[in-house]
Amino acid sequence: MRKSFAFIILLITYLLNGSCSQRVSFFQPDIQYYLAHNLWYTNPKMIEYINYKTGHMIPAGTPVEILDVKLYSYYNSSISFKVPVLRKPIVVYVGPYQPGMSDRDFFNRLLTSDYSSLISGLSKSEFDNIKAGTIAIGMRKRAVILSQGFPPTHRTPTPKQNRWMYWLTKHDKFRVDFDATGRVSSIID
């Protein structure tokens, strides 16, 4: 009986703490942030960080005004922001397809304060593909991330791997293979 009561108290405490959002402190509101990669959306108020390649694209390097960063239990963290083109808030959630990603990783993968590092060292071909939201043979990993975002960690746990999986939609995915030098060697639907 005592064990059951203790378990119920622990469960209630967990649920109450997990359901209350906490503000995170690893970003500074007085700094200008930019999208660190292209971001697609169909509903701007509910974008999963798996970054399905459907709907409208907000380009990498777009300046954002951060409205809120929330930390929830398990995988429901979110970042809300505005971009100059849209007057509505954008809300991006970490979903179940990003296991093991910390909130700091989520923030740092989605946003950057260093715009010049985003575009420095890109070839014209890489820049054009990033702008179009496409991938081409010969692109470097960094350029693929700028174009497509980071691959979901449930199928590509680390970008150090030479095979990345991306999703066009919930049902359609594609694979990007890299050679030993870190350049795209094949794209397979």
Image (cartoon, helix red, strand yellow):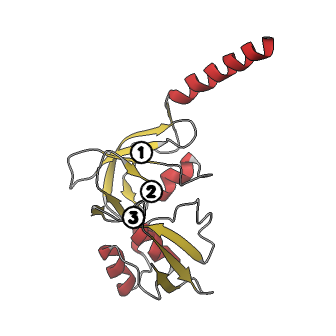
Asked if marks 1 and 2 touch (Cβ < 8 Å), the reply is yes
Query: Residue 81, relative to residue 127: is it above or below?
Result: above
Q: Which residue is mark 1?
A: 79
Q: Earlier in the sequence, mark 1 or mark 2?
A: 1
Q: Which residue is mark 2?
A: 110
Q: Is 134 left or right of 25, judged from the image as shown?
A: left
10 Å crowding of disc 3: few (<14), some (14-19), many (20+)? some
Find the distance from the CA under tag 2 to the CA under tag 3: 13 Å
For label 3, the SS is helix
10 Å crowding of disc 2: few (<14), some (14-19), many (20+)? many
Residue 154: image tag: none
Asked whether 171 or 7 is in front, the reply is: 171
Residue for point 60% across, 52% down:
99
Query: Residue 120, relative to residue 77: is it above or below?
Result: below
Q: Which residue is mark 3?
A: 115
Asked whether 150 or 143 is in front, the reply is: 150
Residue for point 40% across, 42% down:
29
Q: Is 89 left or right of 7, judged from the image as shown?
A: left
What amino acid is labelled 1 in the image? Ile
Q: Earlier in the sequence, mark 1 or mark 3?
A: 1
Which x, y percent locates residue 49?
45, 54
Residue extending farthest to the right is 2
Find the distance from the CA under tag 1 to the CA under tag 3: 19 Å
Residue for point 50% across, 41% down:
76
**Residue 3 visible in the picture:** yes
What amino acid is labelled 2 in the image? Leu
Which x, y percent locates residue 105?
55, 53
Query: Residue 149, relative to residue 91: is it above or below?
Result: below
Q: Is 140 left or right of 10, judged from the image as shown?
A: left
For label 2, the SS is helix
What amino acid is labelled 3 in the image? Tyr
Asked whether 150 or 81 is in front, the reply is: 150
